[in-house]
Image (tube, rainbow, N blue to C red):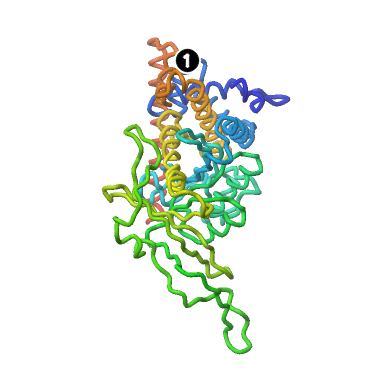
Amino acid sequence: MKSFSDHFKSYRHDVSEGARQYLSGLMQGGKRKNMLHMAEVVPEADARNLQQFLTHSKWGARAVMDQVAQEANKLLGDEHNACLLLDESGFKKQGKQSVGVARQWLGRFGKVDNGQVGVFGALCRDALAAPVDARLYLPKEWTDDPVRCTEAGIPETEPVFRTKDELAWEIVDHARKQGLKFGWVAADAGYGKSPETFYRLTEMKETFFIDVPSDFSVYLKSFQPEAPRSGKLGRPSQHYRTREPKHEVRKLKVLADAAKATVVAGRDTTRGPLELRAWPCGVYVWDPARSAPLRLTLLVTENLDGTERKYTLTNAPERTSLKRLVSQQRQRYWVERVFEDAKGTCGMADYQVQKWSGWHHHMALVMMAMFFMLSERVAQKDVNPLLSCADIEALLVHYLPRRDIEEAEVIRQVRQRHRLRERAIRSHTKRAKKRRKAAV
């Protein structure tokens, strides 16, 4: 908090104590790190005051995120060995008032459900990673409803529909403008569904390793697309054409014989190096809206038992060794560990806010907590190389000041929970009556 305290102070207001209490609650709040549980364990904390701090105080979430990114860059930044990992995470939420909430694909739960989706960037080097950016995805049903956006506190500059891909490109561009050091960008197949991603990152002069779905189509030869006319005097079509056949990556003949693959050691695991079969193959990717295809390398890897296969497109230099290509491809694993630690130890998914500022404030504080854990692991790597985020959380739970629980305090907390339950019941009953009335 000391190194970040200036972000929580202004000429008239100082909310740094609220930030300290909230961060302490993220560590001490148990399995459900919402504000009610925080207030039950953090001395002097009050759930209503924490809600006020998170939703209505004027400190800038972007400034905090940017400092986290700069601090993480000092520890992890490397133009050759570090990478910027892009991924999204879904958060289940009930009701319709929470900013950005809609029925949409929530990858964390593997289904379409009511919730919010954030796009995140994490700086990674070797087995260490830290979140450095967060962007809330707004579905079209939100951006097409200015009144709803205003009620949720969305800034006037934000209610323009942007796809998750576009939010990911913004994260990459913002990271470069901040001077973050990384050698390549990596993302899963959710960002590799469209050829546009590969064109856009190429134009940004970024080296990338982007997974693609098994039915993604590529071309095996270069070609010159033609833009046909719609009649003798017609205007040129907006889409180019080609007669060159395309092939789904899963059906490429080069993958039919496992004996032709090269066995390569990928990333290290607790059980030793992860050995994989690998097939590199030169291919072309094309978007019909573009006048020329892109020459890329398709890197296919699978476990030796054949249970998991990954298809990845990269524009890494052709001189890059296969061992390094596989290592770079498999670095994306660490973004999953970032989300696991952020949700398991730092309460990333346990927030209770409805407004735009509240969501971003929460994510900025979670990023602060995650950076603290990263810095402790780096500082302790020679003495305690196995130190984990869960270990640090357990130590903080023990050492941080904790609210004394006497009989009167226990009764107060129980009554407060009952009041919240009664409020929720009344709200649910009121909504049910409205639905029945509308049905009639």
User: How many badges with numbers are in the image?
Assistant: 1
* Front in this rendered view, residue 208 or 44: 208
Label 1 amino acid?
Leu
Residue 51 spot, x, y in % from top left: 53, 29
In the picture, the quarter occupied by the C terminus is: bottom left
Q: Residue furthest right?
A: 11
**Residue at mark 1:** 400
Residue 90: name its quadrant: top left
| Residue at disc 1, secondary structure | loop
Residue 118 can be seen in this image: yes
Using the image, determine if residue 114 lies above or below residue 280. above
Residue 106 at x, y percent in the picture: 41, 48
Q: What residue is shown at x 35% (from left), y 51% (from top)? A: 262
Front residue of 302/261: it is 261
Q: Residue at x 49, y 64 (%)?
A: 285
- Name the residue nearer the viewer: 305 or 417: 305
Q: Quadrant of the N terminus?
A: top right
The part of the image, by quadrant, that contains residue 54 is top right
User: Residue at (71%, 24%) from the top-left corner?
Assistant: 12
Q: Residue furthest left?
A: 305
Number of other residues with Cα within 10 Å of mark 1, as a class: few under 14, some 14 to 19, many 20 or more: few
In this picture, is 312 found above or below 53? below
Residue 386 location (% of width, % of height): 40, 24
- Is 292 on the left or on the right of 37, as rendered? right
* Residue 289 screen position, x and y as percent: 56, 69
Residue 163 located left or right of residue 274: right
| Residue 56 at least partly seen | no
Quadrant in which residue 331 is drawn: top left
Q: Is residue 285 positioned above or below 372 on the image?
A: below
